[in-house]
Image: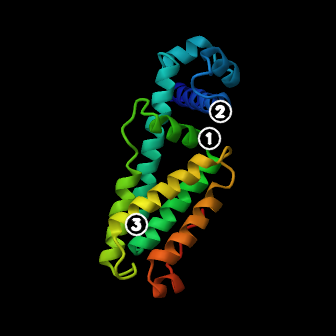
């Protein structure tokens, strides 16, 4: 059992070091030797867990997808209305991407399609906006498909324009203030459901 625990810690150390290195200088510029130096792990220990730098990138992308799926399930499992779920889920994702380098780099790698399928953000946004429309939370005449496309473009843009992850949650909050002013019914905006700020 202690050996298994040590192996998990070693794997985590490799993933964290690789994420930091990829975040700092980019996936293409990072080398196996720089990851080993940063992690303090021997080459033998590395090869026990991964076959190459590419395998680490694939593991980071997979870890992001698993974390995102868990986050979605948690928000979808709450008794919140669809619009509150969408605002809360995107807000938590932004805060975690700001502060968790492993998640942030995994997202970037998944976006580059390194060992992973699409993260499914657009489908979730589209579904929740449609449910918001069906629940009467959107202004009359709002096209849910159009609103979902605009929202997705704005959120992806907010992520893409920042050189640093710092401030991503604030940028998402700005987007929600503007978008909700245009698409949400006034009575919903006056009394939105509480969202988790963790």
Per the rendering, the mark at residue 20 is: 2
Residue 77 appears in the rendering: no
- Residue 51, percent across and down? 47, 16
**Residue 107 sits above or below residue 46 on the image:** below
Residue depicted at x 43% and y 36%: 62
Per the rendering, the mark at residue 147 is: 3
**Going from the N terminus, do you reach mark 2 or mark 3 first?**
2
The answer to which image quadrant residue 81 occupies is bottom left
Measure how far apart labels 3 and 1 are at the Cα level.
30 Å
- Residue 93, percent across and down? 53, 55
**Going from the N terminus, do you reach mark 3 or mark 1 first?**
1
**Residue 79 sits above or below residue 47 on the image:** below
Q: Secondary structure at mark 1?
A: helix
Measure how far apart labels 1 and 2 are at the Cα level.
6 Å
Measure how far apart labels 2 and 3 are at the Cα level.
35 Å
Per the rendering, the mark at residue 148 is: none
Which residue is more in the foreground, 152 or 169?
152
């Amino acid at each position: 059992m202690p050996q298994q625990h040590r192996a998990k810690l070693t794997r985590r150390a490799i993933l964290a070091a690789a994420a930091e290195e990829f975040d700092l200088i980019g996936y293409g510029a990072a080398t196996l030797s720089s990851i080993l130096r940063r992690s303090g792990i021997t080459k033998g220990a590395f090869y026990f867990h991964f076959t190459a730098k590419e395998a680490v990138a694939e593991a980071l992308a997979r870890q992001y997808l698993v974390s995102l799926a868990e986050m979605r399930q948690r928000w979808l499992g709450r008794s919140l209305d669809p619009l509150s779920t969408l605002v809360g889920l995107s807000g938590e994702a932004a805060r975690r991407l700001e502060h968790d380098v492993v998640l942030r780099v995994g997202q970037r790698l998944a976006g580059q399609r390194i060992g992973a399928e699409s993260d499914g953000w657009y489908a979730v946004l589209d579904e929740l906006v449609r449910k918001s429309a069906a629940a009467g939370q959107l202004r009359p005449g709002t096209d849910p498909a159009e609103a979902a496309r605009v929202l997705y473009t704005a959120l992806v843009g907010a992520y893409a324009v920042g050189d640093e992850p710092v401030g991503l949650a604030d940028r998402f909050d700005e987007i929600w203030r503007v978008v909700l002013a245009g698409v949400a019914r006034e009575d919903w905006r006056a009394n939105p459901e509480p969202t988790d700020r963790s």
